[in-house]
C-alpha cells in the first residue's frame, strides 16, 4: 500500500462536546436512514442512538441491512426496518417525513444526487413552492468546539445571488440556534475588491448590501478572500477593517466546487469533524460524505436534533 499523502492529517476527528450537550437537552428525533445496508452508516446511526440522538428507522434493501448489522453484531430486532431498495429508499423516507412519521432524514450508502433526487423535488412534498434549500457544514477542529459554518458544499452547484441569499439566511438561523447571538458571515471571493471581470466579487458585494437590510441580526462582509476570513494579521497587513476578518462564524462559498474542496481539505488535511445538514425542507436532511466515519455521522445526528428542535 502506498504511503499516505503528506497533506493528510493523522489526527482522528471527534464529535464536538458542545454540540452533543445542546442536542441531548432536546427530544430525541425519529431519524430515517436512507440505504442503511452498509457498515459505515449503520455504525453512525447505532452510535447516534446510543448517544440519545436518534430513534433509528432503517430504510433500504432488507437483506443488505440485516447482513451488515450481523457483521457489526448490531441488534436491530427492535428497530423499524422498511424494505425499499436503491432509489426507492429516499422516496420512502420523504413519504415518512411528509406524513409526520420521521423527524429527520439521514444519508446512508447512497450517492448524494440519488439521495436528494428522492427528497427535494416539489413532488416529494418536503418543501414549500419556491423555497430554496441550502446545505451547511458545521466544522470544528480537533482543538476547539467553536464551529465554522460552511455553505454550500453539497447541494447548490452554481448558486445565483438569490440562492446564496437563501443559503446565508439559513446559515445565520442555524448559527443563532447554536447560540451565536450575532453571527459574522463572510462571502468568499478571491479578493476583497469588487472587480467587474470577476463576477463573484460583484455578486458578493450585492449580497452584503442586501444583508444589511434583510439580515440585521448578522454582520456580513463580502467580497472577502480566505486569508482575511481566517487571519487578523492578514487583514491588518492589507488594511482591511471588518469585524468579520479573522473571526468569521459563517463562510458562504460561491459554488459547490469551492465549498466541497474546502470541506474535504479541512477534514482530510486538518482532522476536522464536519457535520452536514440540508435546511429549508420540512425536516432536517443529514448529509455526510460516504467516506466519513462515525464521529461525523454522530455530529450530523446532533445537528439534526438541534435543527429539528428549532422547528418544533
Image (cartoon, rainbow, N blue to C red):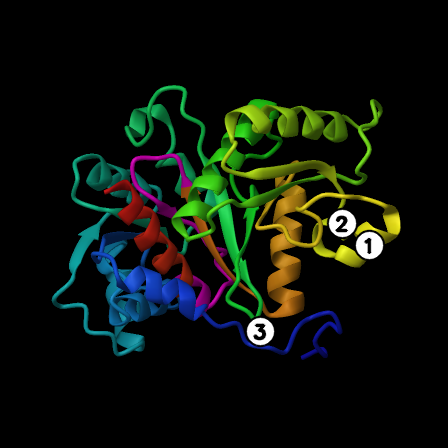
- What residue do we see at 51% from left, 62% from top? 291
Q: Quadrant of the C terminus?
A: top left
Q: Above or below — where is 16 with respect to 224? A: below
User: Closer to the N terminus: mark 1 or mark 3?
Assistant: 3
Q: Residue furthest left?
A: 78
Asked which secondary structure carries label 2, the reply is helix
Could you tell me if the residues under marks 1 and 2 are in contact, i.e. CB atoms within 8 Å? yes
Q: Using residue 49 as the reference point, say whether residue 150 is left or right of it.
A: right
Most common secondary structure along the magenta stretch: loop
The secondary structure type at the circle numbered 3 is loop
**192 w.r.t. 55: above or below:** above
Whichever of callouts 1 and 2 sits on the residue coming sooner in the sequence is 2
Rendered residue at 60%/54% (across/down) = 263
The answer to whether marks 1 and 3 mark residues whose Cβ atoms lie closer than 8 Å is no
Give the extent of the magenta segment: 279-297
Residue 277 lies in the magenta-colored region: no
Question: Residue 281: which quarter of the image?
Answer: top left
Residue 268 horizontal side relative to residue 231, left or right: left
Work out whether residue 279 or residue 46 is closer to the camera in this orientation and state it. 279
Rounded to the nearest whole Å, what is the CA distance between mark 2 and mark 3? Answer: 21 Å
What is the C-alpha distance between the residues marked 1 and 2?
6 Å
280 part of magenta stretch: yes
Residue 294 visible somewhere in the drawing: no
Residue density around tag 3, few if under 14, some if 14–19, many if 20 or more, within 10 Å: few
Q: Residue at x 35, y 59 (%)?
A: 302
Residue, disc 2: 228
Q: Quadrant of residue 88?
A: top left
SS type, badge 1: helix
- Judging by the rendered image, the residue that carries numbered circle 1 is 234
Q: Is residue 236 visible?
A: yes
Amino acid at each position: 500500500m502506498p504511503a499516505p499523502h503528506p497533506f493528510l492529517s493523522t489526527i482522528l476527528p471527534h464529535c464536538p462536546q458542545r454540540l452533543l450537550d445542546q442536542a441531548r437537552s432536546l427530544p430525541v428525533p425519529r431519524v430515517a436512514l436512507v440505504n442503511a445496508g452498509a457498515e459505515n452508516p449503520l455504525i453512525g446511526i447505532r452510535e447516534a442512538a446510543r448517544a440519545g440522538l436518534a430513534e433509528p428507522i432503517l430504510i433500504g434493501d432488507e437483506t443488505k441491512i440485516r447482513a451488515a448489522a450481523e457483521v457489526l453484531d448490531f441488534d436491530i430486532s427492535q428497530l423499524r426496518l422498511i424494505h425499499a431498495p436503491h432509489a426507492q429508499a429516499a422516496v420512502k423516507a420523504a413519504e415518512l417525513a411528509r406524513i409526520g412519521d420521521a423527524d429527520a432524514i439521514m444519508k446512508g450508502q447512497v450517492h448524494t444526487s440519488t439521495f436528494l433526487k428522492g427528497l427535494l423535488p416539489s413532488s416529494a412534498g418536503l418543501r414549500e413552492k419556491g423555497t430554496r434549500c441550502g446545505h451547511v457544514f458545521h466544522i470544528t477542529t480537533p482543538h476547539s468546539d467553536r464551529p465554522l459554518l460552511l455553505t454550500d458544499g453539497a447541494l447548490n452547484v452554481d448558486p445565483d445571488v438569490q440562492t446564496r441569499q437563501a443559503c446565508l439566511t439559513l446559515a445565520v438561523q442555524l448559527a443563532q440556534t447554536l447560540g451565536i447571538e450575532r453571527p459574522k458571515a463572510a462571502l468568499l471571493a478571491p479578493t476583497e475588491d469588487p472587480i467587474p471581470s470577476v463576477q463573484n466579487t460583484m455578486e458578493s458585494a450585492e449580497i452584503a448590501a442586501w444583508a444589511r437590510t434583510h439580515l440585521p441580526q448578522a454582520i456580513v462582509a463580502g467580497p472577502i478572500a480566505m486569508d482575511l476570513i481566517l487571519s487578523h494579521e492578514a487583514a491588518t497587513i492589507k488594511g482591511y477593517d471588518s469585524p468579520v476578518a479573522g473571526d468569521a462564524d459563517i463562510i458562504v462559498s460561491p459554488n459547490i466546487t469551492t465549498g466541497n474542496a474546502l470541506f474535504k481539505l479541512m477534514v482530510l488535511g486538518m482532522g476536522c469533524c464536519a457535520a452536514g445538514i440540508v435546511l429549508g425542507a420540512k425536516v432536517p436532511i443529514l448529509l455526510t460524505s460516504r467516506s466519513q466515519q462515525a464521529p461525523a455521522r454522530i455530529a450530523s445526528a446532533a445537528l439534526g436534533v438541534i435543527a429539528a428542535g428549532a422547528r418544533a
